[in-house]
């Protein structure tokens, strides 16, 4: 499936994507301007068909999305073009306050964006989702594009609004008990901590969140520490005036000692934003 037209649903005309052929030289020119390298499999896909609807339209998640309790919709994969293409990325960043150093390459039916995160590496980037109207602002759905593609599946039935609301309420009820998150910190439970970090990223009790982030610096899981460092950056960028600056300074001091390159990259970005 990975390298042929079975990825794509019908012709350009059938999925409302006008034909716009590109070449490897076009892709190289784009990469040179951006100073990045697009995933090789992604380039193979859009050389076959420069954007459109994938046959498989869902990606599993470990947390609820605005679409469903356990997956996100993937309605269109962008090609090298404007109008639902990766050339729209800069406009989308400004319009939706998306992170910098990304390339938006896909979108769901409910306006969630999937992007290549180049914040800490210039090639083989992880895939993250940003929900303008949901809780997921930088949730990693796949470690790379190949994993993203191989994880796609066909969801036969669209969830109802009631089902989505019930899943979101269940998640809200679960994490309303802050003691549960502290329990998972003590256990160093990877899955639950990543889910909790995502949930509390929108919490109004930011001083408590920062204190818990400091506790997460001792996790043996690099994925947890990276997610915690990324949350610090988000708080500094958007809510710095609402938190105790001494707590932020303590968090920076603690995470500065981390040897993970992604954590260090986030620390550098945080210091630039302060």
Image (cartoon, grey):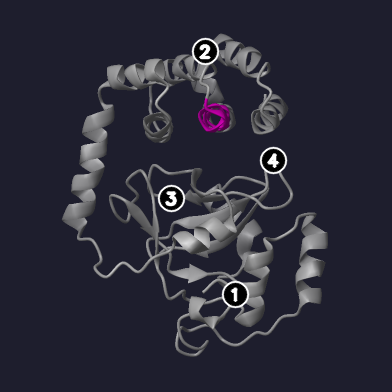
SS at circle 2: loop
Q: CA distance from mark 4 to mark 2?
A: 27 Å
User: Compared to 122, does 265 lie above or below?
Assistant: above
Q: Secondary structure at mark 1?
A: loop
Q: Residues within 10 Å of mark 4 (few under 14, many from 20)?
A: some
Image quarter hosting the C terminus? top right
Q: In the image, 57: left or right of 156?
A: right
Residue beneath label 2, please? Answer: 244
* Disc 3: which residue: 131
Say which residue label 1 marks. Answer: 3
Q: Is residue 230 magenta?
A: yes
Q: Earlier in the sequence, mark 2 or mark 3?
A: 3
Give residue 228's position: percent from left, percent from top.
52, 27
User: Which is nearer the eye, 103 or 241?
Assistant: 103
Of badges 2 and 3, nearer the viewer stands 3
Q: CA distance from mark 3 to mark 4?
A: 21 Å
Q: Which callout, 1 or 2, points at the residue further toward the start of the chain?
A: 1
Q: Nearer the viewer, mark 4 or mark 2?
A: 4
Q: Which mark is residue 120?
A: 4
Vertical relation: 31 (above or below) 22: above
Q: Residue at x 43, y 69 (%)?
A: 75
């Amino acid at each position: 499936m990975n390298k042929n037209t079975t990825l794509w649903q019908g012709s350009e005309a059938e999925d409302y994507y006008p034909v716009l052929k590109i070449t490897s030289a076009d892709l190289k020119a784009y990469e040179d301007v951006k100073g990045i390298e697009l995933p090789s499999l992604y380039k193979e896909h859009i050389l076959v068909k420069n954007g459109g609807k994938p046959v498989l339209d869902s990606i599993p998640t470990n947390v609820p999305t605005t679409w469903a309790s356990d997956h996100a919709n993937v309605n269109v994969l962008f090609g090298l073009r404007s109008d639902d293409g990766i050339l729209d990325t800069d406009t989308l960043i400004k319009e939706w306050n998306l992170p910098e150093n990304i390339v938006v390459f896909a979108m769901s039916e409910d306006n969630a964006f999937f992007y290549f995160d180049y914040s800490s590496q210039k090639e083989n980037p992880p895939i993250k989702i940003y929900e303008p109207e949901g809780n997921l602002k930088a949730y990693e759905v796949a470690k790379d594009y190949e994993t993203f593609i191989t994880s796609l599946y066909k969801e036969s039935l669209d969830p109802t609004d009631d089902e989505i609301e019930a899943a979101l309420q269940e998640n809200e009820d679960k994490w309303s008990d802050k003691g549960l998150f502290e329990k998972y910190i003590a256990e160093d439970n990877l899955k639950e901590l990543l889910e909790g970090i995502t949930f509390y990223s929108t919490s109004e009790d930011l001083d408590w969140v920062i204190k818990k982030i400091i506790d997460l610096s001792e996790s043996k899981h690099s994925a947890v520490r990276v997610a915690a460092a990324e949350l610090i950056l988000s708080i500094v960028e958007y809510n710095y005036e609402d938190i105790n600056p001494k707590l932020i300074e303590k968090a920076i001091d603690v995470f500065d000692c981390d040897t993970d390159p992604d954590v260090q990259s986030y620390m550098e970005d945080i210091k630039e934003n302060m």
